[in-house]
């Protein structure tokens, strides 16, 4: 777009790097921002600066927080001996939305991947081992994605720590609202293997 | 999400106001930003502040520009007597991408809409009339959306100015790559009415 100002071009290029936005939707978003300059554009810029300044990773678990230790690690009430291992902060939030898990988390910051050359030393796995003893963990719940990389990571972690604590992983089966007809063979096979008496 | 820091919540709420982003994709985008804090988050915040400070509407045509008069209005070479009326800056950019129109633009800043109570005085229509004489316009090309509101606006503008200049509008018909089977009746009827000898 030769005739749009350079500053706008720069902003569009940056916005297009966000997941879920391509060049076209980034352009639309930027035009919307410019239209709502007073109400949205400066507010958004300030909110980003604020996040860049204040938000950091919890030194203990890797959750995002404005403190060195996140509210979950700081809460004595969450020290119930259970530790839920997740790939990402988004997964931690998803677990928290369910409101069912009352223990603490450990955010790996990714999964092992030979293709992207992510090894154990690139994830927060050493820190995980340290925490087992320090926090008196009795059960590690592996809540990792049901993908090849996710399961490789789960197996790796389980092998590393299963002689020290009980290691469990989330159940596989039909999602709520799922229709048998639309399920893949892997899920059906997992649901069959994990069947329960009613 | 009770356990994500408040600053992140604020940022997610703001991002979710962008067109094309909902709460879920805004969350994903914000987590991506936080991960790429150094490379993306601060750069993006700065780019937004820069746009908020530097970009304004061209006083003549309504295009976005860092100057009082946009490059298109400033270019003598674009004063060819043709004026293309578009709804929005995005439409101006779309026309410019085609690279075929060599005249100047007039950005209305919206279309007439009884539902949203947008009247002629809310659009840049008075300024359009002023420009006709001041810039010696011979032809006004109405490049407005083929929607009810777009066409109402086109008719309104045509009635206001057709005694002074030639008023044309973009052709209706099959889009390039369009398949007859997938076209609506309105388009087929317009394509039929506008048929040409080969």
Image (cartoon, coloured by chain):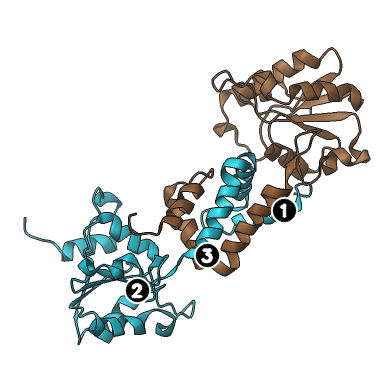
Chain colours: A cyan, B brown
**Could you tell me which chain the residue with mark 3 belongs to?**
A
Query: Secondary structure under badge 1?
Result: helix
Chain letter, disc 1 residue: A
Which residue is the site of mark 1?
Answer: A7
What is the distance, in whole Å, between disc 1 and disc 3 at their CAs? 24 Å
Dividing the image into 4 quarters, which one contains the C terminus of chain B? top right
Chain letter behind tag 2: A
Q: Residue at the spot x=38%, y=68% of the render?
A: A63
Left/right of residue B43 with respect to residue A185 in the rendered view: right
Q: Position of residue A156 (x, y in %)?
A: 31, 82
Q: Mark 1, residues whose alpha carbon is within 10 Å: few (<14), some, or many (≥20)?
A: some
Q: Position of residue B97 (x, y in %)?
A: 75, 45
**Of the image marks 1 and 3, the number of the one nearer the N terminus:** 1
What x and y, as percent, mark residue A167? Answer: 21, 77
Q: Is residue B121 above or below residue A112?
A: above
- Tag on residue A53? 3
Disc number lying in front (2 or 3):
3
Mark 2: which secondary structure? Answer: loop
Circle 1 or circle 3, nearest the eye:
3
Measuring from the top left, give residue B151's x and y in whole percent: 66, 21
To which residue does mark 2 refer? A61
Image height check: is A143 above or below A128? above
Task: Say which residue appears at 49% left-offset and 76% top-offset.
Answer: A116
How far is disc 2 from disc 3 in space, using C-alphas?
20 Å
Q: Earlier in the sequence, mark 1 or mark 2?
A: 1
Other-residue count near label 2 (Cα within 10 Å), few / some / many at <14 / 14–19 / ≥20 = many
Exactly how many numbered labels are in the figure?
Answer: 3
What whole-number distance in Å separates the C-alpha atoms at marks 1 and 2?
39 Å
Co-location on one chain, circles 1 and 2: yes
């Amino acid at each position: 777009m030769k005739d749009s100002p350079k500053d706008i071009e720069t902003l569009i290029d940056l916005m297009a790097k966000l997941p879920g936005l391509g060049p076209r939707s980034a352009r639309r978003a930027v035009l919307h921002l410019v239209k709502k300059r007073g109400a949205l554009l400066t507010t958004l810029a300030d909110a980003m600066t604020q996040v860049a300044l204040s938000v950091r990773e919890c030194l203990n678990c890797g959750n995002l927080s404005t403190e060195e230790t996140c509210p979950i690690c700081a809460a004595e009430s969450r020290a119930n001996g259970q530790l839920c291992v997740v790939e990402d902060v988004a997964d931690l939030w998803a677990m928290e939305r369910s409101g069912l898990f009352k223990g603490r988390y450990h955010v790996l910051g990714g999964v092992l991947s030979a293709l992207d050359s992510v090894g154990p030393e690139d994830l927060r796995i050493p820190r995980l081992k340290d925490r087992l003893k320090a926090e008196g963990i009795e059960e590690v719940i592996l809540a990792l994605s049901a993908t090849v990389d996710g399961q490789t990571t789960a197996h790796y972690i389980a092998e590393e720590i299963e002689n020290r604590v009980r290691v469990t992983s989330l159940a596989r089966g039909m999602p709520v609202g799922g229709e048998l007809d639309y399920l893949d063979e892997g899920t059906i096979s997992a649901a069959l293997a994990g069947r329960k008496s009613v």
